[in-house]
Image: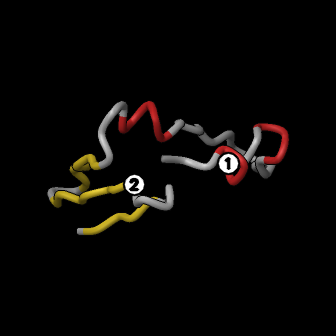
Amino acid sequence: MTNDNNLARPSELPVPTGRAQRIIESRELFGTENEILISHDGAIYRMKITRQGKLILNK
């Protein structure tokens, strides 16, 4: 369960200086799941959405 009142709105996002950065919505990564595995530089990381709607990344 997420609280949309705590989500940054596009107009409130900081404007990056110099190079443009990609913004990926977490729901694009997670879909209907609460946890995903991410492979980075030969290691597996676990990213989880908590009951409070926060993200936690563990190696």
- Colour style of the rendered protein structure: secondary structure
Q: Is residue 58 left or right of residue 20?
A: left
Q: Which mark is residue 45?
A: none
Q: Who's the residue at 48% across and 47% down the image?
A: 1
Q: Secondary structure at mark 1?
A: loop
Position of residue 2 measured from the top left corner of the image (x, y, whole percent): 54, 47
Position of residue 38 measured from the top left corner of the image (x, y, whole percent): 25, 49
Q: Residues within 10 Å of mark 2 (few under 14, many from 20)?
A: some
The amino acid sitting under disc 2 is Ile
Please name the residue that numbered disc 1 is placed on.
7
Q: Who's the residue at 42% across and 59% down the image?
A: 51
Q: Which mark is residue 49?
A: 2
Q: Who's the residue at 39% across and 64% down the image?
A: 56
Q: Would you place residue 2 above or below residue 50 in this image?
A: above
Q: Who's the residue at 17% across and 60% down the image?
A: 43
Position of residue 48 measured from the top left corner of the image (x, y, whole percent): 33, 56
Quadrant including the C terminus: bottom left
Mark 2 to mark 1 CA distance (whole Å): 14 Å
Q: Secondary structure at mark 2?
A: strand
Q: Is residue 44 left or right of residue 11?
A: left
Q: Residues within 10 Å of mark 1 (few under 14, many from 20)?
A: few
Q: Would you place residue 3 above or below residue 56 in this image?
A: above
Sequence order check, earlier mark of 2 and 1: 1
Q: Nearer the viewer, residue 54 or 28?
A: 54
Position of residue 8 measured from the top left corner of the image (x, y, whole percent): 72, 48
